[in-house]
Image (cartoon, rainbow, N blue to C red):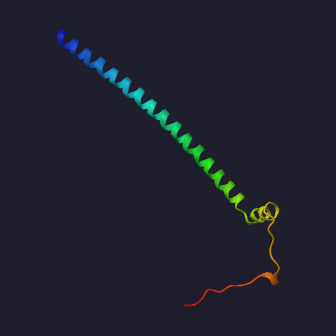
Amino acid sequence: MTRLNFILFFVLIFSALGLVTSQHKARKLYFELQQQQDAAKQYETEWSQLQLEQSTWAMHSRLEQVASDLLHMHVPDTKHIQIVFPDKQ
């Protein structure tokens, strides 16, 4: 009878240790999942900010301002505009 009690006691101890180990791993993985989700939210916010910045830099008025101020470009007079049509083959 004592042999059976020892066997059952060790089975109980090993199953308890297995339960504790699996709970610890589950909590560790859940914490890692939360960190990855937070990082994904942060990357999504950064991506939307970059898209907004890109649209701001590519606005027509901004390009026109840069062309006139930095590159000293201007729209030519209508008498200096020449329209060229491609040859029809």
Q: Quadrant of the N terminus?
A: top left
Which residue is rendered at x = 72% and y = 63% of the image? 59
Q: Position of residue 46 (x, y in %)?
A: 62, 47
Residue 26 quadrant: top left
Which residue is rendered at x = 45% and y = 30% of the image? 28
In the image, residue 62 sits, relative to residue 6, either above or below, namely below
In the image, residue 49 sits, relative to residue 37, either above or below, namely below
Horizontal relation, residue 41 to residue 70: left or right: left
Which residue is rendered at x = 51% and y = 39% of the image? 36
Q: Position of residue 18 (x, y in %)?
A: 33, 24
In the image, residue 40 sits, relative to residue 61, either above or below, namely above
Given residues 87 and 53, the one toward you in this image is 87
Given residues 11 and 58, the one toward you in this image is 58
Residue furthest out toward the bottom: 89
Q: Position of residue 83 (x, y in %)?
A: 71, 85
Horizontal relation, residue 61 to residue 30: left or right: right
Q: Quadrant of the C terminus?
A: bottom right
Given residues 4 and 23, the one toward you in this image is 23
Q: Position of residue 80 (x, y in %)?
A: 80, 81
Number of callouts in the render?
0
Given residues 28 and 47, the one toward you in this image is 47
Residue furthest out toward the top: 2
